[in-house]
Amino acid sequence: MAEGHASPNYWLIWLYLFILTVTEIAVIFTPVAKLLIVIALVSLALVKATLVAAYFMHLRFEARTLALIALTPLFLGALLIFILIPDHSAVAHKTADSVKVAPAAGHR
Amino acid sequence: MSQVATMHPGTEPAESPLTPESWGKLGMWIFLVGDAMGFGTLLAAYGAMRFGSADWPNPYQRLGINLTAFMTFLLICSSVTMVKGLEGVKNGQRRIAQIYLLLTIIGGAGFLGLQAFEWTKLINEGLKIFGNPWGASLFGTTFFIITGFHGLHVTGGVIYLSVMLALVSKPTTALGTGWTYNVVEISGLYWHFVDLVWIMVFTFIYLL
């Protein structure tokens, strides 16, 4: 790896990351549906993370298998979200600190 | 097998299959994957708690993103200075490598200073690990645990990079593409990972 590839233009990557960060901040003040904002922000963050991993961490120039290993936490994260979704639907209502429901009072 | 061993003298018996330069690099990658799972779990738990809460404050109105946007900028810059420092090691330019590594350390230390300032400000405003004046108390808990866990990683990184700077500064350390390059590159992997995690933390904790 040390001399196996030409160095990428790191300042260009820096510029991309900078522009993407500014875009992220602009996105949260855009007057569109919250869901769209969430999708935009998560996508932008994933693009930024990919840039860092691929160029700064040289993952683009490593064995393909190493990139696959590096991706495994993303699968775990996605899996966790799916594991936690049933919890949300099992809770009938959202709870707030100010209106804590007394445990087992009126339920069942 | 013995032929391979004689072709590559040293303490390691054979080449690492995924990172031919060294086993250490593969070791760092595996550590980072595990660490990423830790952060992933924290962020997924954060999402679940926030989704189940009716009075979660709007983070960017309460936490003040101007400062954290600058902290993000600082970490991104320190990632560039890290790769530039590594390039200096590769090209045998000790002075360049030293300057860029020092800039990287300053970036990390600056990040920590700003985080301490931010925490102090929020604590004075009433945000506690077990309480939050603006609604759900878990907002305070998740904020301090997740940014604190990341801050610890930055602290570790600053110490790690200081050791690397000392190593590169020693006149007896041979630069070039050999062992030193490999060791500094591994420390760089850790540093970029800390930057990468901050990108996620910034998005999920501050912006969303």
Image (cartoon, coloured by chain):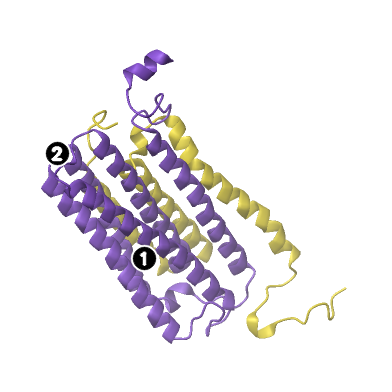
Q: What residue sits right under mark 2 in the picture?
A: B92
Number of residues whose C-alpha sits closer than 10 Å to that of mark 2, classed few (under 14), some (14–19) or many (20 or more) = some
Q: Chain of mark 1?
A: A
Which residue lies at the image location 56% right of the left edge and 56% below the top edge? B41
Q: Nearer the viewer, mark 2 or mark 1?
A: 2
Q: Chain of mark 2?
A: B
Which residue lies at the image location 33% right of the left edge and 33% below the top edge? A61
Q: Amino acid at mark 1?
A: Ile
Could you say where residue B189 lies in the image, as x and y percent from the top left? 35, 46
In the rendered image, the quadrant that contains the N terminus of chain B is: top left
In the rendered image of the structure, the colour used to display chain A is: yellow
Question: Could you tell whether A1 is left or right of B27 in the image?
Answer: left
Quarter occupied by residue B14: top left
Q: Residue furthest right?
A: A108
Q: Amino acid at mark 2?
A: Gly
In the rendered image of the structure, the colour used to display chain B is: purple
Judge if badges 2 and 1 mark residues of a common chain. no
Q: What residue sits right under mark 1 in the picture?
A: A25
